[in-house]
Amino acid sequence: MTVPLDFSFAFQQLVYGLTLGCLYGLLAIGYSMVYGVLRLINFAHGDLLMVSAYFAFFGMVIFQIPWPVSFIGSVLFTAILGILIDRGAYRPIRKSPRINALITAIGVSFLLENLGLVLIGGRPKSFPLPALFEGSFVIGAVNVPALSIWTLLVTLVLLVVCAVVVKKTRIGMAMRALSRDMETVMLMGIDKDRVISFTFALGSAMAAAGGIMWCMKYPAVEPFMGVIPGLKAFVAAVLGGIGNITGAALGGLILGLIEVLFVAVEPDWSGYRDAVSFFLMIVILLTRPTGIMGERLPD
Amino acid sequence: MDLLLDIRALSVLFGGVRALDGLNLEIIKGEIIGLIGPNGAGKTTAFNAITGRIKPSSGSVFFRGQDITGLAPFRIARKGIARTFQNIKLYEDLSVIENVMIAAHSSISYSFMEAILGMGRFRRDESRIRSKALELLELMDLKDLALERANSLPYGSQRKLEIARALALDPQLLLLDEPVAGMNPTETREFGNFLLKLRDNLSIGVGVIDHDMSFVMEVCDKIRVIDHGIPIAWGTASQIRNDKKVIGAYLGTDFDRTQNHNATN
Amino acid sequence: MSSQRIFRKDFNSTTKIRNKVLTLLSVIVLLGFLFYADRNLDAYSVRILQNIAIFIILAVSYNLINGIMGQFSLAPNAFLAIGAYTSAIFTLSPEEKLRSFIIEPMIWPLSQISLPFSLSLLIAGIVTAFVALLMAAPVFRVRGDYLAIVTLGFGEVVQVLANNLVSLTNGSLGLKGLYPFTNLWWAWGVCIFTVFCTVRLVNSSYGRAMKAVREDEMAAEAMGINAFRIKTFTFAFSAFFQGVAGGLLAHLITTISPSLFTFMFTFNLLIIIVIGGLGSITGSILAAILITWGGEALRVFEEPSTFFGFHYEGIPGMRMVIFSAILIVVMIFARGGIMGRYEFTWDGLFHWFKRKLLILGI
């Protein structure tokens, strides 16, 4: 049985789009959580993707640690870095005007990028692909890379973990309460800083997972690699409804699909690919500013 | 009779909860109307819905015969409804006089260009706004503090400044959200007298929310009581004082004790 | 009465005239200095002076949004690019356009147009302001918060467009052979004009409305201020000057390409307005001078470059590491920067001077 060419082409693009979308989604979840809890656009979030990639890269290539240990270590270290960033840079200015926090965030982002440049250098490093993720399945005329399946799997598992943590655990409920109304939480006697630290840890870990998966797909590790994915992840978070975890993942998937299909439909437009998310953001703001699954945030 | 504000069956839904349910209220020019009720009764919600801060889910608000339901807050303000906030909202880092002058912004007639060139209507408007602001500060006994930063003022003065700022809008209706909170009995009494004078001199309508019952009973011509968003009573101070539903709403406790408690708060 | 004394000091007409005369005098002194510099200083120093003027224009107009109105924009590099390209497209001669557009010829009406520099600057400003208006309207209608991310994304989009709209921008090859119109007089003339306009605007009711929006948007709206309108218009106003600065910059360095207008520009400006004091115009001017100069000094950590570009020699990124560390430290420990929200005023100077004399017992 032969699959019609158009159908297989479409299916192929769907596979690529979903894979890219999962990566955006993983990054968007953390972005969304931190924004929900602190109302802060954590510009450094995209750079955590870069940091996690370097951690994993150094683990595997320099220290010759087996890849599963390197990956887990990278996720842990990135989570710790997330907490440290919050404690070092954001906590001291919790009470300052919002713009000061935003400026600090952009400072942290730039510091990470340029520290990377100074310490490691700007030349892209090639990220090794563990054998497990190599190869692909061929279904009809459609080529499904093993990595795509792994990416989808990892995203789904982490999404479920996150959703359970946020919905079922005490600290998760505190997170949700915090993103609704700061003052009520204070009254309830919850240690706000602990909840925020936890949010940063969880979000950074998700970014790290996304970063590692990203590097296996696009194996060039360099200091500014997190900037564009970070921007797009934020758009995905807004698309899904900022503060909503499932929404963020969904937003990531949609954005990934739109980007891939945009180029698939008209290959001449490939140069404009990075502009798609920007215009999508404008369209969301004009039509449905609360996103797909978002509720109106209190001011 | 000069009807200023006419609220008809105003309701506000908050994520399934009825924060305000079918409020009817009329405020006539030269009248002070009280809006009271236990904590969480929906008083501030009512003010927010009137001033456009939140969109009512049903019902309507008429101001001088015009339907203003759901208009943007700044449009409602420009029509002549000024308000103060329960948790004082001053422009903290600006000077006292700037705080007042800002409220006169909608009255300026000069353009961006004239502002840059500093000519034409710019000078006239600026000196008008400035002297008006000084006048209002004098009225509120704040003139000596004109160049101080707003958040360096003591609490009571901040409340007064908020009222001065609201008056700079030249309102026909003034909505005060807990104006005497944090004031001692003497200050409260003085403020009550001031409010009565204001009503008579400017002949404006005033809506007041407060927990200080003796203050509300003292100054208000009519009082509307709400509980859990639902209006339960309407009348003069003496009528309200003897209303069984009202007494019941205040936790079934002795109403007078609530009064005293709130007065000392 | 004490209040009357305070007001006499502030609103007295002779003091006002005195202040005006002093301001005028200092402008004349500045012009005299420029005249001297134009004749006697070496090309490198003159270049730094021109850079300073352009950075003052950028910093003052940027500070209007971030400092005075309290909205976090990251757009300057994009606006600079739009202004630079627009003015360059209008000043290049048809022959030069024919010569350099080798991938695709330039689209028709533009390929034949060549306008005077002054007009091209004006168009650059207007085009940039218009683009700013288009972008700001959807953002300010909803959440001002998103401005940062939208403007950051916009910076990327402008680079994408500059690379891909080949028949308009000549793609990655960029525009070459611009006539170096920008001299000390153009740079400082526009600079003085920008500062003048901004100061006037900030001292008007519009300026107060901007500050009210910064302090408490809800309270501003409750007092009849149309926050959406004031934000959008101020954003466009600021973009106008940034576009003009882009035109000046293009005709200073005479070659522009998409890779020139990176986020680095915006970051430098952010450093300037933060160090000068968010919300202080004089602080921004002071810091623009300081950082443009100091930035030159810090260049020893890296290889010298043509103009604030990316470079992978020396210790690349070191300057930016230092700058971002400074930014974070200032935000945490000294968020007012040099001037806080205060402005340099003649009254302040005299007051300070009198106090000094008093202390010295003279």
Image: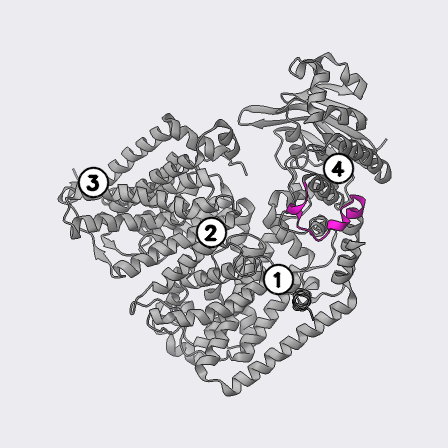
Residue bearing the label numbered 4: B174
Residue bearing the label numbered 2: C332
User: What is the secondary structure assignment of the residue under circle 4?
Assistant: strand
The mark found on residue A153 in the picture is none
Name the outermost residue toward the bottom.
C39
Where is residue A253 shown, x and y percent of the image? 34, 41
Marks 2 and 4, how far apart at CA: 41 Å
Marks 1 and 3, how far apart at CA: 72 Å
- Tell whether label 4 touches label 3 (CB within 8 Å): no
Marks 1 and 2, how far apart at CA: 22 Å
User: What is the secondary structure assignment of the residue under circle 1?
Assistant: loop
The mark found on residue C343 in the picture is 1
Residue bearing the label numbered 3: A3
In terms of sequence position, does the residue under pointer 1 or pointer 2 come before the other? 2
Neighbor class of circle 1 (other Cα within 10 Å; few <14, some 14-19, many 20+) is some
Neighbor class of circle 4 (other Cα within 10 Å; few <14, some 14-19, many 20+) is many
Quarter location, residue A33:
top left
- Tell whether label 4 touches label 1 (CB within 8 Å): no
State how the image is colored: one colour
**Residue A250 showing in the rendered view:** no
Q: Chain of mark 3?
A: A
Quarter location, residue B194:
top right
**Residue span colored magenta:** B136-154
Q: Is residue B145 above or below residue C101?
A: above
Q: Chain of mark 1?
A: C
Q: Which one is nearer the viewer's eye here, A144 or A40?
A: A40
Amino acid tagged 2: Ile
